[in-house]
Each structure stands twice: as structure tokens, then as C-alpha cells.
Image (cartoon, rainbow, N blue to C red):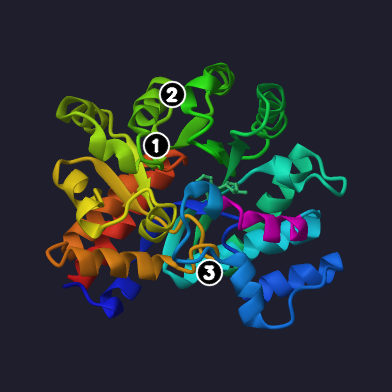
């Protein structure tokens, strides 16, 4: 079995990490002070509000945890600090390239606009890039509960920022997948893909939602957030995801908490990997799921003792292939990962 010490040394790519779900305790306190918000008195009480308990029953219950942290993220200053904090944590996990996602519509309560919210996050990513050996890009999420009209406004961010801002890497749909399945967002996705925007969509995160994985791909997604229910698709459908090199952004701790899955035997990470599907490992939400990327890798190493160093390298190459970044950057990452993993072997 791969040891925690070896995992710590592995360079990693992280494609699926939510800004608002991943703030460190220290940053939560700092943001609250800046915002003039009084937090519960003890660290344990703060974390109890911010973390989803083990016995969380569903994705919807998991998502309730975001109500605690969003009031802290309503100014450019705080969004910038938050973005910096998440990149710093990822760098401690030896992450070399990360995409951090958030829903700009959730940060407009104190005068920010969709575009200024995104610019604040990108400013934080850039500051962190100057301090840590990591490349960090931003993804914009639309929330499924919002109206199509207000989701459509998210295209303006890309229209305003894409030409001058290469760190705005792509678009995602997050939120309540069970009640708002993919198919209702076809026109929105059309607006995005016609602009050449890279798409990753949360899909197949709730039991019975496998069709959403297929619909996402039809609607232009090259990556799927979680995609756990890919396990319920036919062999032919799974083979087509492999053939299209669709990247599945799995996040073990989160996937168990949201009850996408209940037992390790049912967790499809290894089965799908063995079939050649492009699975990757991510945290989803460091704080809400009380985890980091090191721990997610350790889980996989523990569950699948025959998952070798070369397999961990392979999932990182899959992640690089799926990254929303220029081809030249991908080539550099591929080469440097090859070298680093060779040195660890
Ligand atoms: O795992 C998730 N599934 C669906 N939506 C999610 C998940 N984690 C976070 N979100 C939502 C809540 C956040 O406020 C939003 C943007 O990060 O994305
Ligand atoms: Zn997510």
C-alpha cells in the first residue's frame, strides 16, 4: 500500500474545489472580523457550523452548510483573501495546478457585481501564485435553483472578462441536482458553448441520476463533477465516456457525505479506472468535508491497496489532459509530473 509519506511527496492536480466550501478556520475568523460578523465563541462551535457531519443524509443537507460561510464572502477584500487561502492550502497538499470554483451570484449582497466578484477571486489567485509554486484558475458556477434568466447573466462575465483574463477558465452547474436535472439547462449551456467556454458540470452525484452524466456530455461538458452514477450506465455508455476522454472529478469524502454512495464496495473509482475511464481525485470542499487532498489520496490508497504509484501518476495525467488551460501549460505539467513521479519510484 502507498504510504502517507509518499502521498505527501506526490505532485497533484486538483480540478474540483469550491472556494466557499474550503476556507481554513483562521481565514473564517479573519473574514468574520473584516465583515463585522460575530462567530460562535469556540473553534469547535465554528467548525460545527461549517462542517457537514458524517451522518448527513443527502446532497441538499450537505449544501445547507454553505449558508454559514456565504455572509463572510460579500466584499472584494474577503473574496481575495479566501481565494488566497484556498490556494495556500492546496499548495500544502503539493498541488501544482488547481481550479477553484464558486457561484458569483452568491456574493452580491454588498454591492459587488458578477464581474467584480470574479475579479476579486482572480486577484487572490494571482497573489497566491506569486507566493506558492502553483498555477490557480477560477471556474464560475451557476446554481441550478436560480432562474434561467439570471443564470444567463453569467455569460456577461465571460463576455466582459474573457478577452483580458486568462484565469477565468470555465463554467460549472452546481447545487440541487436531484430537483433540477441537467436537461433543463440546455439553452444556457448552448449560450456557454457557443462562446467556446470550457464546461464541467456536477452530474451523477445523487442516486438515480446517471442520465445527467450522459446529458452533460451531450450538452458540451468535457468533465463531470463527481459522476458517481456513471457506475449505473451500460458498458457501451461507459466506453463512450472513455473514448471521449471525459474526466470524472471524484471526491471520496464528499461523495460519502452526500450519500451519493454508502459503501466502499459500491464506490466506482477503481472499477471505472480499471476500465480506462479518466477518473481524478479532488477534495470538493475542504472545510465542509473536513478534508484535504492528502486525506483523499490516503483513502484511495487504503481502499485499494493495489493502486500503485504509477496509477496515482496516471490519474494526475488524466487531470492535466482535462484541465482548462493552454496546451503548452499542459505539456509542461505532463513533463514535470513524469519526472517527479519517476524520482519517487
Ligand atoms: O458537491 C456539491 N454538489 C453540488 N453543489 C455543490 C457541491 N459543493 C458545493 N456546491 C455548491 C454550493 C456552493 O455555494 C456553490 C459554489 O461553490 O456550489
Ligand atoms: Zn462540487
What residue is at 79 percent from the left and 53 percent from the top? 74
Q: Which SS does the magenta portion mostly show?
A: helix
Q: Residues within 10 Å of mark 2 (few under 14, many from 20)?
A: many
The answer for how far apart the CA atoms under marks 2 and 3 are is 31 Å
Residue 336: image quadrant is: bottom left
Q: Position of residue 270 (x, y in %)?
A: 19, 52
**Is 324 displayed left or right of 33 in the figure?**
left
Q: Which residue is mark 1?
A: 223
- Marks 1 and 2, how far apart at CA: 9 Å
Q: Nearer the viewer, residue 225 or 87?
A: 225
Place of residue 144 in the rendered image (x, y in percent of width and height, measured from the top left): 59, 33
Is 178 displayed left or right of 107 in the figure?
A: left
Magenta region, residue range = 63-73
Residue designated by label 3? 89
The answer to whether mark 3 and mark 1 are in CB contact below 8 A is: no
Q: Is residue 203 above or below residue 265?
A: above
Q: Is residue 234 magenta?
A: no
CA separation in Å, label 3 and label 1: 24 Å
Q: Which residue is mark 2?
A: 220
Camera-side residue of 229 and 32: 229
Label 2, secondary structure: give it: loop
Instruction: Rate crowding at label 1 as few (under 14), some (14 to 19) or many (20 or more) other CA atoms within 10 Å.
Output: many
Where's the N terminus, which quadrant?
bottom left
Residue pictured at 69% horizontal, 42% vertical: 104
Residue 322, given in percent of the width and then of the height, sits at 37, 40
Q: Is residue 66 magenta?
A: yes
Amino acid at each position: 500500500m502507498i504510504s502517507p509519506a509518499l502521498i505527501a511527496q506526490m505532485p497533484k492536480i486538483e480540478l474540483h474545489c469550491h472556494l466557499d466550501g474550503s476556507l481554513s478556520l483562521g481565514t473564517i475568523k479573519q473574514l468574520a472580523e473584516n465583515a463585522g460578523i460575530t462567530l460562535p465563541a469556540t473553534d469547535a462551535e465554528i467548525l460545527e457550523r461549517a462542517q457537514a457531519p458524517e451522518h448527513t443524509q443527502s446532497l441538499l443537507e450537505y449544501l445547507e452548510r454553505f449558508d454559514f460561510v456565504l455572509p463572510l464572502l460579500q466584499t472584494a477584500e474577503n473574496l481575495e483573501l479566501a481565494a488566497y487561502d484556498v490556494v495556500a492550502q492546496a499548495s500544502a497538499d503539493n498541488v501544482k495546478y488547481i481550479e477553484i470554483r464558486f457561484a458569483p451570484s452568491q456574493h452580491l449582497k454588498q454591492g459587488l457585481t458578477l464581474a467584480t466578484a470574479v475579479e476579486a477571486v482572480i486577484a487572490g489567485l494571482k497573489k497566491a501564485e506569486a507566493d506558492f509554486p502553483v498555477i490557480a484558475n477560477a471556474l464560475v458556477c451557476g446554481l441550478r435553483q436560480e432562474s434561467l434568466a439570471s443564470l444567463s447573466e453569467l455569460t456577461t462575465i465571460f463576455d466582459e472578462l474573457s478577452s483580458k483574463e486568462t484565469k477565468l477558465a470555465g463554467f460549472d452547474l452546481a447545487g440541487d441536482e436531484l430537483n433540477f436535472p441537467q436537461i433543463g439547462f440546455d439553452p444556457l449551456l448552448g449560450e456557454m458553448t457557443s462562446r467556446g467556454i470550457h464546461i464541467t458540470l456536477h452530474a451523477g452525484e445523487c442516486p438515480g441520476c446517471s442520465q445527467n452524466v450522459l446529458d452533460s456530455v451531450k450538452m458540451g461538458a468535457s468533465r463531470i463533477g463527481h459522476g458517481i452514477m456513471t457506475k449505473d450506465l451500460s458498458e457501451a455508455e461507459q466506453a463512450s465516456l472513455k473514448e471521449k476522454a471525459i474526466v470524472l472529478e471524484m471526491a471520496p469524502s464528499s461523495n460519502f457525505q452526500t450519500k451519493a454512495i454508502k459503501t466502499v464496495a459500491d464506490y466506482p473509482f477503481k472499477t471505472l479506472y480499471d476500465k480506462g475511464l479518466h477518473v481524478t481525485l479532488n477534495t470538493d470542499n475542504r472545510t465542509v468535508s473536513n478534508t484535504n487532498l492528502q486525506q483523499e489520496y490516503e483513502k484511495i490508497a487504503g481502499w485499494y491497496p493495489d493502486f500503485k504509484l504509477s496509477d496515482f501518476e496516471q490519474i494526475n495525467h488524466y487531470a492535466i489532459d482535462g484541465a482548462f488551460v493552454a496546451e503548452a501549460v499542459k505539456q509542461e505539467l505532463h513533463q514535470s509530473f513524469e519526472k517527479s513521479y519517476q524520482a519517487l519510484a
